Amino acid sequence: MDQNKIPQATAKRLPLYYRFLNNLQHQGKTRVSSKELSEAVKVDSATIRRDFSYFGALGKKGYGYNVEYLLGFFRKTLDQDETTEVALIGVGNLGTAFLHYNFTKNNNTKIVMAFDANPQRIGDEIGGVPIYHIDELEEKMNGNVRVGILTVPSKEAQGITTRLVEHGVEGILNFTPARITVPSHIRVHHIDLAVELQALVYFLKHYPLSKSE
Amino acid sequence: MDQNKIPQATAKRLPLYYRFLNNLQHQGKTRVSSKELSEAVKVDSATIRRDFSYFGALGKKGYGYNVEYLLGFFRKTLDQDETTEVALIGVGNLGTAFLHYNFTKNNNTKIVMAFDANPQRIGDEIGGVPIYHIDELEEKMNGNVRVGILTVPSKEAQGITTRLVEHGVEGILNFTPARITVPSHIRVHHIDLAVELQALVYFLKHYPLSKSE
DNA sequence: ATACAATTGTGAAATTAATCACGACGTTTA
DNA sequence: TAAACGTCGTGATTAATTTCACAATTGTAT
Ligand SMILES: NC(=O)c1ccc[n+]([C@@H]2O[C@H](COP(=O)([O-])OP(=O)(O)OC[C@H]3O[C@@H](n4cnc5c(N)ncnc54)[C@H](O)[C@@H]3O)[C@@H](O)[C@H]2O)c1
Ligand SMILES: NC(=O)c1ccc[n+]([C@@H]2O[C@H](COP(=O)([O-])OP(=O)(O)OC[C@H]3O[C@@H](n4cnc5c(N)ncnc54)[C@H](O)[C@@H]3O)[C@@H](O)[C@H]2O)c1
Protein backbone atom coordinates (compact mmCIF):
# COMPACT_ATOMS: atom_id res chain seq x y z
CA MET A 1 0.00 0.00 0.00
CA ASP A 2 0.91 3.67 -0.12
CA GLN A 3 4.61 4.41 -0.06
CA ASN A 4 6.39 1.22 0.74
CA LYS A 5 9.65 3.07 0.43
CA ILE A 6 9.46 4.78 3.78
CA PRO A 7 12.03 3.27 6.13
CA GLN A 8 10.67 1.76 9.28
CA ALA A 9 12.96 3.92 11.37
CA THR A 10 11.35 6.96 9.79
CA ALA A 11 7.84 5.65 10.29
CA LYS A 12 8.50 5.23 13.99
CA ARG A 13 9.46 8.85 14.30
CA LEU A 14 6.40 10.25 12.56
CA PRO A 15 4.10 10.23 15.60
CA LEU A 16 6.78 12.07 17.51
CA TYR A 17 7.03 14.79 14.91
CA TYR A 18 3.27 15.01 14.74
CA ARG A 19 2.92 15.55 18.44
CA PHE A 20 5.53 18.25 18.55
CA LEU A 21 4.04 20.08 15.59
CA ASN A 22 0.75 20.08 17.41
CA ASN A 23 2.39 21.72 20.38
CA LEU A 24 3.92 24.34 18.13
CA GLN A 25 0.60 25.16 16.59
CA HIS A 26 -1.00 25.55 19.98
CA GLN A 27 1.76 27.98 20.83
CA GLY A 28 0.85 29.95 17.74
CA LYS A 29 4.11 29.35 15.91
CA THR A 30 3.79 29.48 12.14
CA ARG A 31 7.22 28.33 11.02
CA VAL A 32 9.86 25.94 12.21
CA SER A 33 13.27 24.80 10.99
CA SER A 34 14.74 21.33 11.08
CA LYS A 35 17.26 22.69 13.58
CA GLU A 36 14.59 23.79 16.04
CA LEU A 37 12.73 20.53 15.62
CA SER A 38 15.96 18.68 16.19
CA GLU A 39 16.57 20.31 19.53
CA ALA A 40 13.06 19.61 20.67
CA VAL A 41 12.73 15.98 19.68
CA LYS A 42 16.41 15.06 20.03
CA VAL A 43 16.83 13.72 16.52
CA ASP A 44 19.63 14.95 14.26
CA SER A 45 18.44 17.69 11.94
CA ALA A 46 19.71 15.92 8.84
CA THR A 47 17.71 12.88 9.85
CA ILE A 48 14.61 15.01 10.17
CA ARG A 49 15.08 16.56 6.75
CA ARG A 50 15.70 13.13 5.29
CA ASP A 51 12.59 11.76 6.97
CA PHE A 52 10.44 14.57 5.63
CA SER A 53 11.95 14.26 2.18
CA TYR A 54 10.49 10.79 1.72
CA PHE A 55 7.14 12.53 1.46
CA GLY A 56 8.33 15.10 -1.08
CA ALA A 57 9.46 18.67 -0.71
CA LEU A 58 7.53 19.90 2.31
CA GLY A 59 9.71 22.87 3.24
CA LYS A 60 11.09 26.00 1.71
CA LYS A 61 14.80 26.64 1.40
CA GLY A 62 16.02 29.48 3.54
CA TYR A 63 12.71 29.52 5.42
CA GLY A 64 11.99 26.18 6.98
CA TYR A 65 8.64 24.47 7.26
CA ASN A 66 5.21 25.99 7.61
CA VAL A 67 3.75 24.50 10.78
CA GLU A 68 0.16 24.43 9.62
CA TYR A 69 0.98 22.91 6.27
CA LEU A 70 3.25 20.29 7.76
CA LEU A 71 0.74 19.41 10.43
CA GLY A 72 -2.01 19.05 7.88
CA PHE A 73 0.21 16.82 5.83
CA PHE A 74 1.04 14.55 8.75
CA ARG A 75 -2.55 14.46 9.86
CA LYS A 76 -3.43 12.86 6.56
CA THR A 77 -0.36 10.64 6.50
CA LEU A 78 -0.97 9.34 9.99
CA ASP A 79 -4.70 8.95 9.34
CA GLN A 80 -5.55 11.19 12.23
CA ASP A 81 -9.06 11.63 10.94
CA GLU A 82 -10.12 8.04 11.22
CA THR A 83 -10.11 6.25 14.55
CA THR A 84 -8.69 2.80 15.02
CA GLU A 85 -10.51 0.77 17.62
CA VAL A 86 -8.47 -1.04 20.23
CA ALA A 87 -9.32 -3.70 22.82
CA LEU A 88 -7.36 -4.15 26.04
CA ILE A 89 -7.06 -7.57 27.65
CA GLY A 90 -6.13 -7.81 31.32
CA VAL A 91 -7.39 -5.04 33.59
CA GLY A 92 -4.69 -5.34 36.25
CA ASN A 93 -2.13 -2.81 37.34
CA LEU A 94 -0.87 -1.91 33.94
CA GLY A 95 -4.16 -2.35 32.12
CA THR A 96 -5.96 -0.04 34.54
CA ALA A 97 -3.34 2.67 34.00
CA PHE A 98 -3.80 2.45 30.24
CA LEU A 99 -7.57 2.61 30.51
CA HIS A 100 -7.39 5.79 32.55
CA TYR A 101 -5.06 7.31 30.03
CA ASN A 102 -6.67 5.90 26.91
CA PHE A 103 -4.24 7.59 24.54
CA THR A 104 -6.85 10.19 23.78
CA LYS A 105 -4.71 13.25 23.26
CA ASN A 106 -3.98 14.00 19.57
CA ASN A 107 -4.69 10.46 18.82
CA ASN A 108 -6.34 8.33 16.25
CA THR A 109 -6.71 5.34 18.50
CA LYS A 110 -9.31 4.55 21.11
CA ILE A 111 -9.67 1.70 23.53
CA VAL A 112 -13.31 0.77 23.08
CA MET A 113 -13.55 -2.29 25.31
CA ALA A 114 -11.59 -4.23 27.88
CA PHE A 115 -11.66 -7.82 29.12
CA ASP A 116 -10.63 -9.55 32.31
CA ALA A 117 -11.08 -12.93 33.96
CA ASN A 118 -11.61 -11.57 37.45
CA PRO A 119 -15.37 -11.28 38.15
CA GLN A 120 -14.80 -8.35 40.48
CA ARG A 121 -13.82 -6.14 37.60
CA ILE A 122 -16.58 -7.11 35.22
CA GLY A 123 -19.34 -4.62 34.63
CA ASP A 124 -17.34 -1.64 35.74
CA GLU A 125 -16.23 1.10 33.46
CA ILE A 126 -12.83 2.74 33.64
CA GLY A 127 -12.40 5.98 31.79
CA GLY A 128 -15.63 5.27 29.93
CA VAL A 129 -14.44 1.89 28.69
CA PRO A 130 -16.69 -1.08 29.52
CA ILE A 131 -15.06 -4.15 31.03
CA TYR A 132 -16.38 -7.53 29.96
CA HIS A 133 -15.58 -11.07 30.99
CA ILE A 134 -12.96 -12.71 28.85
CA ASP A 135 -15.48 -15.42 27.94
CA GLU A 136 -17.42 -12.77 26.09
CA LEU A 137 -14.49 -11.85 23.89
CA GLU A 138 -15.89 -13.48 20.79
CA GLU A 139 -19.33 -12.06 21.36
CA LYS A 140 -18.37 -8.45 22.04
CA MET A 141 -15.68 -8.02 19.45
CA ASN A 142 -17.55 -6.97 16.39
CA GLY A 143 -14.87 -7.06 13.75
CA ASN A 144 -14.08 -3.37 14.07
CA VAL A 145 -11.32 -3.89 16.60
CA ARG A 146 -8.03 -3.93 14.74
CA VAL A 147 -5.57 -3.77 17.63
CA GLY A 148 -5.23 -5.61 20.92
CA ILE A 149 -3.24 -4.49 23.95
CA LEU A 150 -2.08 -7.44 26.03
CA THR A 151 -1.65 -6.80 29.75
CA VAL A 152 -2.47 -10.27 31.07
CA PRO A 153 -0.14 -12.61 32.96
CA SER A 154 2.43 -13.94 30.55
CA LYS A 155 1.22 -17.52 30.60
CA GLU A 156 -2.15 -16.36 29.26
CA ALA A 157 -0.64 -14.36 26.43
CA GLN A 158 -0.50 -17.01 23.73
CA GLY A 159 -4.02 -18.28 24.24
CA ILE A 160 -5.57 -14.83 24.20
CA THR A 161 -3.52 -13.87 21.18
CA THR A 162 -4.85 -16.77 19.18
CA ARG A 163 -8.40 -15.82 20.03
CA LEU A 164 -7.81 -12.17 19.13
CA VAL A 165 -6.34 -13.10 15.78
CA GLU A 166 -9.25 -15.40 15.00
CA HIS A 167 -11.55 -12.49 15.58
CA GLY A 168 -9.97 -10.06 13.20
CA VAL A 169 -7.27 -8.32 15.20
CA GLU A 170 -4.35 -7.38 12.95
CA GLY A 171 -1.91 -5.86 15.39
CA ILE A 172 -0.93 -6.60 18.96
CA LEU A 173 0.88 -4.46 21.49
CA ASN A 174 2.29 -7.02 23.87
CA PHE A 175 3.37 -5.91 27.34
CA THR A 176 3.88 -9.42 28.68
CA PRO A 177 7.33 -10.97 28.71
CA ALA A 178 6.03 -13.87 26.62
CA ARG A 179 7.06 -13.96 22.99
CA ILE A 180 3.92 -14.88 21.15
CA THR A 181 3.51 -16.78 17.92
CA VAL A 182 1.19 -15.35 15.31
CA PRO A 183 0.34 -15.94 11.65
CA SER A 184 2.64 -14.11 9.27
CA HIS A 185 0.17 -11.36 8.43
CA ILE A 186 -0.22 -10.19 12.02
CA ARG A 187 2.02 -7.50 13.39
CA VAL A 188 3.27 -7.67 16.97
CA HIS A 189 5.12 -4.96 18.85
CA HIS A 190 6.70 -5.99 22.11
CA ILE A 191 7.19 -3.51 24.88
CA ASP A 192 9.15 -5.29 27.51
CA LEU A 193 9.48 -2.92 30.43
CA ALA A 194 11.68 -5.16 32.55
CA VAL A 195 14.07 -5.58 29.64
CA GLU A 196 14.15 -1.83 29.07
CA LEU A 197 15.15 -1.23 32.66
CA GLN A 198 17.78 -3.96 32.63
CA ALA A 199 19.20 -2.72 29.37
CA LEU A 200 19.49 0.80 30.76
CA VAL A 201 21.39 -0.52 33.76
CA TYR A 202 23.66 -2.55 31.50
CA PHE A 203 24.48 0.53 29.46
CA LEU A 204 25.22 2.53 32.59
CA LYS A 205 27.73 -0.02 33.77
CA HIS A 206 29.35 -0.98 30.51
CA TYR A 207 29.11 2.08 28.32
CA PRO A 208 29.76 5.02 30.61
CA LEU A 209 29.22 8.23 28.72
CA SER A 210 31.95 10.80 28.75
CA LYS A 211 31.19 14.45 29.32
CA SER A 212 31.50 15.11 25.60
CA GLU A 213 29.79 12.12 24.08
CA MET B 1 34.92 -0.08 30.51
CA ASP B 2 34.63 -3.78 29.87
CA GLN B 3 33.92 -4.78 26.30
CA ASN B 4 33.17 -1.60 24.45
CA LYS B 5 32.90 -3.62 21.28
CA ILE B 6 29.52 -5.09 21.98
CA PRO B 7 26.96 -3.55 19.64
CA GLN B 8 24.12 -1.75 21.31
CA ALA B 9 21.60 -3.88 19.47
CA THR B 10 23.18 -6.92 21.05
CA ALA B 11 23.24 -5.39 24.51
CA LYS B 12 19.51 -4.76 24.33
CA ARG B 13 18.84 -8.40 23.67
CA LEU B 14 20.90 -9.73 26.54
CA PRO B 15 18.23 -9.39 29.23
CA LEU B 16 15.85 -11.23 26.95
CA TYR B 17 18.22 -14.13 26.53
CA TYR B 18 18.89 -14.17 30.23
CA ARG B 19 15.25 -14.42 31.11
CA PHE B 20 14.63 -17.25 28.71
CA LEU B 21 17.65 -19.19 29.90
CA ASN B 22 16.31 -18.90 33.40
CA ASN B 23 13.05 -20.44 32.28
CA LEU B 24 14.90 -23.27 30.62
CA GLN B 25 16.85 -24.00 33.75
CA HIS B 26 13.68 -24.09 35.81
CA GLN B 27 12.33 -26.60 33.35
CA GLY B 28 15.42 -28.70 33.96
CA LYS B 29 16.79 -28.44 30.45
CA THR B 30 20.55 -28.80 30.24
CA ARG B 31 21.26 -27.91 26.63
CA VAL B 32 19.81 -25.57 24.05
CA SER B 33 20.59 -24.70 20.45
CA SER B 34 20.48 -21.31 18.80
CA LYS B 35 17.59 -22.63 16.73
CA GLU B 36 15.48 -23.41 19.79
CA LEU B 37 16.34 -20.10 21.36
CA SER B 38 15.46 -18.39 18.14
CA GLU B 39 11.97 -19.82 18.08
CA ALA B 40 11.39 -18.86 21.68
CA VAL B 41 12.62 -15.29 21.64
CA LYS B 42 11.82 -14.56 17.99
CA VAL B 43 15.31 -13.48 17.02
CA ASP B 44 17.06 -14.99 14.01
CA SER B 45 19.35 -17.84 15.06
CA ALA B 46 22.34 -16.36 13.24
CA THR B 47 21.83 -13.16 15.16
CA ILE B 48 21.82 -15.08 18.41
CA ARG B 49 25.04 -16.89 17.55
CA ARG B 50 26.59 -13.61 16.51
CA ASP B 51 25.47 -11.97 19.75
CA PHE B 52 26.94 -14.75 21.85
CA SER B 53 30.15 -14.76 19.87
CA TYR B 54 31.02 -11.25 21.03
CA PHE B 55 31.63 -12.83 24.40
CA GLY B 56 33.82 -15.60 23.05
CA ALA B 57 33.06 -19.19 22.15
CA LEU B 58 30.30 -20.11 24.57
CA GLY B 59 28.91 -23.10 22.74
CA LYS B 60 30.04 -26.38 21.28
CA LYS B 61 29.72 -27.23 17.62
CA GLY B 62 27.28 -29.99 16.94
CA TYR B 63 25.93 -29.71 20.45
CA GLY B 64 24.67 -26.24 21.19
CA TYR B 65 24.98 -24.38 24.46
CA ASN B 66 25.03 -25.68 28.01
CA VAL B 67 22.20 -23.92 29.80
CA GLU B 68 23.86 -23.73 33.17
CA TYR B 69 27.13 -22.46 31.82
CA LEU B 70 25.49 -19.88 29.62
CA LEU B 71 23.25 -18.71 32.42
CA GLY B 72 26.18 -18.35 34.77
CA PHE B 73 28.01 -16.39 32.16
CA PHE B 74 25.14 -14.00 31.58
CA ARG B 75 24.55 -13.62 35.27
CA LYS B 76 28.02 -12.18 35.60
CA THR B 77 27.80 -10.16 32.43
CA LEU B 78 24.49 -8.60 33.40
CA ASP B 79 25.64 -8.01 36.96
CA GLN B 80 22.78 -10.01 38.35
CA ASP B 81 24.49 -10.29 41.67
CA GLU B 82 24.58 -6.63 42.51
CA THR B 83 21.40 -4.63 42.84
CA THR B 84 20.96 -1.23 41.25
CA GLU B 85 18.75 1.10 43.25
CA VAL B 86 16.02 2.95 41.44
CA ALA B 87 13.73 5.83 42.42
CA LEU B 88 10.32 6.38 40.87
CA ILE B 89 8.90 9.89 40.53
CA GLY B 90 5.17 10.33 40.06
CA VAL B 91 2.91 7.82 41.80
CA GLY B 92 -0.05 8.15 39.45
CA ASN B 93 -1.64 5.54 37.24
CA LEU B 94 1.49 4.31 35.62
CA GLY B 95 3.76 4.82 38.61
CA THR B 96 1.48 2.82 40.86
CA ALA B 97 1.48 -0.07 38.42
CA PHE B 98 5.27 -0.09 38.35
CA LEU B 99 5.50 -0.02 42.13
CA HIS B 100 3.27 -3.05 42.43
CA TYR B 101 5.35 -4.88 39.92
CA ASN B 102 8.75 -3.61 41.02
CA PHE B 103 10.64 -5.61 38.41
CA THR B 104 11.61 -8.10 41.07
CA LYS B 105 11.65 -11.31 39.09
CA ASN B 106 15.14 -12.37 37.90
CA ASN B 107 16.20 -8.85 38.29
CA ASN B 108 19.10 -6.80 39.45
CA THR B 109 17.11 -3.63 39.92
CA LYS B 110 14.92 -2.50 42.78
CA ILE B 111 12.74 0.53 43.24
CA VAL B 112 13.72 1.66 46.72
CA MET B 113 11.73 4.88 47.03
CA ALA B 114 9.06 6.87 45.29
CA PHE B 115 8.06 10.54 45.25
CA ASP B 116 4.88 12.42 44.53
CA ALA B 117 3.53 15.94 44.93
CA ASN B 118 0.05 14.85 46.01
CA PRO B 119 -0.17 14.86 49.82
CA GLN B 120 -2.73 12.05 49.75
CA ARG B 121 -0.15 9.58 48.59
CA ILE B 122 2.63 10.57 50.93
CA GLY B 123 3.44 8.23 53.78
CA ASP B 124 1.88 5.21 52.14
CA GLU B 125 3.82 2.27 50.95
CA ILE B 126 3.09 0.42 47.75
CA GLY B 127 4.65 -2.96 47.31
CA GLY B 128 6.96 -2.18 50.21
CA VAL B 129 8.26 1.01 48.63
CA PRO B 130 7.91 4.17 50.75
CA ILE B 131 6.40 7.23 49.12
CA TYR B 132 7.83 10.60 50.05
CA HIS B 133 6.92 14.14 49.15
CA ILE B 134 8.79 15.46 46.17
CA ASP B 135 10.19 18.25 48.32
CA GLU B 136 12.12 15.60 50.22
CA LEU B 137 13.85 14.35 47.10
CA GLU B 138 17.21 15.84 47.97
CA GLU B 139 17.01 14.68 51.55
CA LYS B 140 15.99 11.07 50.94
CA MET B 141 18.17 10.31 47.98
CA ASN B 142 21.37 9.13 49.49
CA GLY B 143 23.65 8.89 46.52
CA ASN B 144 23.00 5.20 46.03
CA VAL B 145 20.17 5.70 43.60
CA ARG B 146 21.55 5.41 40.10
CA VAL B 147 18.37 5.30 38.04
CA GLY B 148 15.18 7.35 38.01
CA ILE B 149 11.86 6.33 36.50
CA LEU B 150 9.82 9.33 35.42
CA THR B 151 6.06 8.94 35.51
CA VAL B 152 5.06 12.54 36.24
CA PRO B 153 3.04 14.84 34.01
CA SER B 154 5.16 15.84 31.05
CA LYS B 155 5.51 19.49 32.01
CA GLU B 156 7.19 18.45 35.27
CA ALA B 157 9.67 16.16 33.54
CA GLN B 158 12.48 18.60 32.86
CA GLY B 159 12.55 20.12 36.33
CA ILE B 160 12.57 16.78 38.10
CA THR B 161 15.22 15.48 35.73
CA THR B 162 17.54 18.32 36.60
CA ARG B 163 17.12 17.65 40.29
CA LEU B 164 17.72 13.92 39.85
CA VAL B 165 20.88 14.51 37.91
CA GLU B 166 22.17 16.94 40.52
CA HIS B 167 21.74 14.21 43.08
CA GLY B 168 23.73 11.55 41.36
CA VAL B 169 21.29 9.76 39.09
CA GLU B 170 23.06 8.49 35.98
CA GLY B 171 20.24 7.01 33.98
CA ILE B 172 16.62 7.94 33.42
CA LEU B 173 13.75 5.88 32.10
CA ASN B 174 11.36 8.50 30.83
CA PHE B 175 7.73 7.57 30.29
CA THR B 176 6.55 11.12 29.71
CA PRO B 177 6.16 12.45 26.20
CA ALA B 178 8.57 15.27 27.01
CA ARG B 179 12.04 15.02 25.51
CA ILE B 180 14.32 16.02 28.31
CA THR B 181 17.69 17.71 28.15
CA VAL B 182 20.50 16.25 30.24
CA PRO B 183 24.27 16.64 30.54
CA SER B 184 26.20 14.52 28.09
CA HIS B 185 27.18 11.87 30.62
CA ILE B 186 23.61 10.98 31.57
CA ARG B 187 21.79 8.26 29.71
CA VAL B 188 18.10 8.60 28.94
CA HIS B 189 15.82 5.93 27.52
CA HIS B 190 12.45 7.09 26.32
CA ILE B 191 9.50 4.78 26.37
CA ASP B 192 6.76 6.61 24.64
CA LEU B 193 3.68 4.44 24.86
CA ALA B 194 1.44 6.68 22.81
CA VAL B 195 4.02 6.75 20.04
CA GLU B 196 4.34 2.97 20.14
CA LEU B 197 0.61 2.57 19.66
CA GLN B 198 0.46 5.11 16.87
CA ALA B 199 3.42 3.56 15.13
CA LEU B 200 1.78 0.14 15.28
CA VAL B 201 -1.36 1.55 13.68
CA TYR B 202 0.70 3.28 11.01
CA PHE B 203 2.42 0.02 10.15
CA LEU B 204 -0.89 -1.81 9.97
CA LYS B 205 -2.26 0.65 7.47
CA HIS B 206 0.81 1.29 5.39
CA TYR B 207 2.83 -1.89 5.54
CA PRO B 208 0.29 -4.69 5.38
CA LEU B 209 2.02 -8.01 5.88
CA SER B 210 1.43 -10.75 3.38
CA LYS B 211 0.73 -14.29 4.48
CA SER B 212 4.29 -15.28 3.70
CA GLU B 213 6.26 -12.29 4.98
C1' DA C 1 35.46 -47.58 14.78
C1' DT C 2 33.06 -45.22 11.46
C1' DA C 3 29.54 -42.73 9.40
C1' DC C 4 25.94 -39.58 10.04
C1' DA C 5 23.53 -35.68 11.94
C1' DA C 6 23.57 -31.51 14.30
C1' DT C 7 25.16 -27.10 15.33
C1' DT C 8 28.62 -23.61 16.15
C1' DG C 9 31.42 -19.49 14.89
C1' DT C 10 32.37 -16.35 11.48
C1' DG C 11 33.96 -14.28 6.89
C1' DA C 12 31.45 -12.02 3.49
C1' DA C 13 27.41 -9.94 1.58
C1' DA C 14 23.29 -7.52 2.10
C1' DT C 15 20.39 -4.41 4.21
C1' DT C 16 19.13 -0.56 6.83
C1' DA C 17 19.98 3.75 9.01
C1' DA C 18 22.52 7.91 10.23
C1' DT C 19 25.45 11.58 9.05
C1' DC C 20 28.24 14.73 6.26
C1' DA C 21 28.54 18.46 3.41
C1' DC C 22 27.14 21.49 -0.07
C1' DG C 23 24.62 23.51 -4.14
C1' DA C 24 20.39 25.69 -4.85
C1' DC C 25 17.15 28.70 -3.68
C1' DG C 26 14.00 31.58 -0.91
C1' DT C 27 13.92 35.25 2.62
C1' DT C 28 15.33 39.30 4.74
C1' DT C 29 17.56 43.62 5.06
C1' DA C 30 19.15 47.83 3.57
C1' DT D 1 17.72 45.90 -6.40
C1' DA D 2 21.35 43.53 -4.61
C1' DA D 3 23.91 41.38 -1.11
C1' DA D 4 23.95 38.53 2.93
C1' DC D 5 21.98 34.94 5.20
C1' DG D 6 19.48 30.77 6.41
C1' DT D 7 17.74 26.43 5.41
C1' DC D 8 16.24 22.78 2.54
C1' DG D 9 16.89 18.57 -0.20
C1' DT D 10 19.97 15.15 -1.38
C1' DG D 11 24.21 12.63 -3.44
C1' DA D 12 27.75 10.47 -1.29
C1' DT D 13 29.67 8.41 2.59
C1' DT D 14 29.95 6.07 6.76
C1' DA D 15 28.17 3.29 10.37
C1' DA D 16 25.41 -0.25 12.33
C1' DT D 17 22.93 -4.37 12.05
C1' DT D 18 21.24 -8.47 10.04
C1' DT D 19 21.53 -12.39 7.27
C1' DC D 20 23.69 -15.93 4.33
C1' DA D 21 26.19 -19.89 3.92
C1' DC D 22 29.63 -23.12 5.01
C1' DA D 23 33.97 -25.32 7.01
C1' DA D 24 34.98 -27.20 11.31
C1' DT D 25 33.84 -29.80 15.07
C1' DT D 26 31.30 -32.47 18.22
C1' DG D 27 27.86 -35.88 19.76
C1' DT D 28 25.26 -40.04 18.67
C1' DA D 29 24.05 -44.35 16.67
C1' DT D 30 25.28 -48.61 14.86
N1 LIG E 1 2.90 -3.79 36.09
C1 LIG E 1 4.09 -3.59 35.57
O1 LIG E 1 4.75 -2.61 35.91
C2 LIG E 1 4.66 -4.53 34.57
C3 LIG E 1 5.98 -4.34 34.15
C4 LIG E 1 6.53 -5.22 33.20
C5 LIG E 1 5.75 -6.22 32.66
N2 LIG E 1 4.47 -6.37 33.07
C6 LIG E 1 3.69 -7.45 32.47
O2 LIG E 1 2.42 -6.96 32.11
C7 LIG E 1 1.45 -7.97 32.36
C8 LIG E 1 0.40 -7.41 33.29
O3 LIG E 1 1.02 -6.94 34.47
P1 LIG E 1 0.17 -6.41 35.69
O4 LIG E 1 1.11 -5.90 36.70
O5 LIG E 1 -0.88 -5.48 35.19
O6 LIG E 1 -0.48 -7.76 36.23
P2 LIG E 1 -1.85 -7.97 37.05
O7 LIG E 1 -1.78 -9.29 37.64
O8 LIG E 1 -2.08 -6.77 37.90
O9 LIG E 1 -2.94 -7.94 35.92
C9 LIG E 1 -3.25 -9.02 35.11
C10 LIG E 1 -4.75 -9.01 34.89
O10 LIG E 1 -5.08 -9.99 33.93
C11 LIG E 1 -6.26 -10.66 34.37
N3 LIG E 1 -6.30 -11.98 33.75
C12 LIG E 1 -5.71 -13.12 34.15
N4 LIG E 1 -5.97 -14.12 33.29
C13 LIG E 1 -6.75 -13.59 32.33
C14 LIG E 1 -7.36 -14.12 31.18
N5 LIG E 1 -7.21 -15.39 30.81
N6 LIG E 1 -8.11 -13.29 30.43
C15 LIG E 1 -8.27 -12.01 30.78
N7 LIG E 1 -7.73 -11.45 31.86
C16 LIG E 1 -6.97 -12.24 32.62
C17 LIG E 1 -6.16 -10.69 35.87
O11 LIG E 1 -7.45 -10.84 36.44
C18 LIG E 1 -5.54 -9.33 36.16
O12 LIG E 1 -6.52 -8.34 36.34
C19 LIG E 1 2.18 -9.15 32.94
O13 LIG E 1 2.45 -10.07 31.92
C20 LIG E 1 3.46 -8.56 33.45
O14 LIG E 1 4.52 -9.48 33.39
C21 LIG E 1 3.93 -5.54 34.01
N1 LIG F 1 -1.00 6.11 32.04
C1 LIG F 1 -0.67 5.80 30.81
O1 LIG F 1 -1.15 4.84 30.27
C2 LIG F 1 0.32 6.62 30.06
C3 LIG F 1 0.54 6.33 28.71
C4 LIG F 1 1.47 7.08 27.99
C5 LIG F 1 2.15 8.11 28.62
N2 LIG F 1 1.92 8.37 29.92
C6 LIG F 1 2.69 9.43 30.53
O2 LIG F 1 3.18 9.02 31.77
C7 LIG F 1 3.14 10.07 32.69
C8 LIG F 1 2.33 9.65 33.90
O3 LIG F 1 1.04 9.24 33.48
P1 LIG F 1 -0.07 8.85 34.52
O4 LIG F 1 -1.24 8.37 33.73
O5 LIG F 1 0.47 7.98 35.55
O6 LIG F 1 -0.43 10.28 35.12
P2 LIG F 1 -1.04 10.61 36.55
O7 LIG F 1 -1.57 12.00 36.47
O8 LIG F 1 -1.93 9.51 36.97
O9 LIG F 1 0.23 10.58 37.49
C9 LIG F 1 1.12 11.63 37.63
C10 LIG F 1 1.54 11.68 39.10
O10 LIG F 1 2.60 12.62 39.22
C11 LIG F 1 2.36 13.38 40.40
N3 LIG F 1 3.06 14.65 40.26
C12 LIG F 1 2.66 15.79 39.65
N4 LIG F 1 3.60 16.73 39.74
C13 LIG F 1 4.62 16.19 40.42
C14 LIG F 1 5.88 16.67 40.84
N5 LIG F 1 6.29 17.89 40.54
N6 LIG F 1 6.67 15.84 41.54
C15 LIG F 1 6.28 14.59 41.84
N7 LIG F 1 5.10 14.07 41.47
C16 LIG F 1 4.29 14.88 40.77
C17 LIG F 1 0.86 13.52 40.49
O11 LIG F 1 0.48 13.77 41.82
C18 LIG F 1 0.42 12.14 40.02
O12 LIG F 1 0.31 11.24 41.07
C19 LIG F 1 2.54 11.25 31.97
O13 LIG F 1 3.56 12.08 31.49
C20 LIG F 1 1.83 10.62 30.80
O14 LIG F 1 1.80 11.47 29.69
C21 LIG F 1 1.02 7.65 30.65
Image: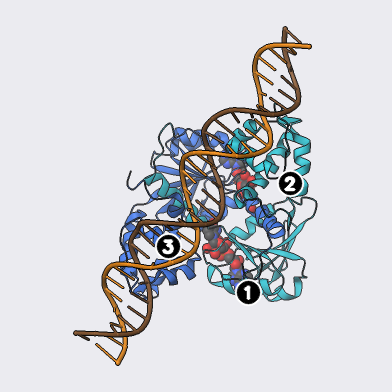
Chain colours: A blue, B cyan, C orange, D brown
Is disc 1 surrounded by few (<14), some (14 to 19) or many (20+) residues within 10 Å? some
Q: Residue furthest right?
A: B81
Ligand 2 quarter of the rendering:
bottom right
CB under 8 Å between discs 1 and 2 = no
Is disc 3 surrounded by few (<14), some (14 to 19) or many (20+) residues within 10 Å? many
Question: What x and y, as percent, mark residue B167?
Answer: 71, 73
**Residue underneath mark 1:** B162
Q: Which residue is drawn at 37% across and 51% down?
A: A83
Question: What x and y, as percent, mark residue A54?
Answer: 35, 55
- Quick one: label 1 or label 2, which is nearer the N terminus? 2
**Residue underneath mark 3:** A48
Q: Distance between the residues labelled 1 and 2?
A: 31 Å
Residue type, numbered disc 2: Asn
Residue type, numbered disc 1: Thr
Indicate which label's residue lies in the foreground, 2 or 3.
3
Work out whether disc 1 and disc 2 sit on a shared chain.
Answer: yes
The chain letter under disc 3 is: A
Q: How far apart are marks 1 and 3 (CA)?
A: 27 Å
The chain letter under disc 2 is: B
Q: In this view, does A206 lie to the left or right of C21?
A: right
Above or below, B97 against B154 in this view is: above
Residue D3 placement: quadrant: bottom left
**Residue underneath mark 2:** B106
Question: In terms of secondary structure, where does tag 2 sit?
Answer: loop
Is disc 2 surrounded by few (<14), some (14 to 19) or many (20+) residues within 10 Å? few
Q: In this view, does A99 lie to the left or right of B68?
A: left
